[in-house]
Amino acid sequence: MDLSKYEALSAKLRVLGHPVRLCIVNGLSKKGLHVKQICESLGIPQPVISLHLSKLKAVGIVDCERQGSCVRYHVVDKATLRLLEMLPK
């Protein structure tokens, strides 16, 4: 058995276990969003959203691209997208 594969998966599942992060990823699964858009849609301050996004990025669930002074995030992990499809709407 390849334990390292399960360690990486476990880390992703732990990060997704937070309701705000799960909500962020669900929103990003439909289209990429700027940090400001995420803040406005959830009603959560930018520093808190940035902290959650950094945790999602650290485990490889999301990535970002800079567009001028804005940063746009999107989901890059295909397994996470498949997992989101299985969750109740």
Image (tube, rainbow, N blue to C red):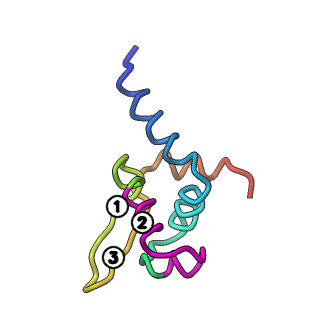
Residue at mark 2: 74
Q: In this view, does 84 lie above or below 5?
A: below
Q: Is residue 10 above or below residue 59?
A: above
User: In the drawing, does residue 58 fall left or right of residue 83?
Assistant: left
Point out the stretch of residues depicted in magenta: 37-54
Is label 3 in contact with label 1 (beta carbons under 8 Å)? no
Amino acid type, mark 2 = His
Quarter of the C terminus within the rendering: bottom right
Q: Nearer the viewer, residue 39 or 81?
A: 39
Q: Residue at x 35, y 25 (%)?
A: 4
* N-terminal label among 2 and 1: 1
- Rounded to the nearest whole Å, what is the CA distance between mark 3 and mark 1? 10 Å
Which of the numbered marks, if any, corresponds to residue 63?
A: 1
Q: Which residue is drawn at 37% across and 18% down?
A: 2
Q: Residue at x 37, y 58 (%)?
A: 54
What secondary structure is marked by label 2? Answer: strand
Residue 70 position within the rendered picture, expressed as x and y whole percent measured from the top left: 32, 82
What secondary structure is marked by label 1? Answer: strand
Residue at mark 3: 71
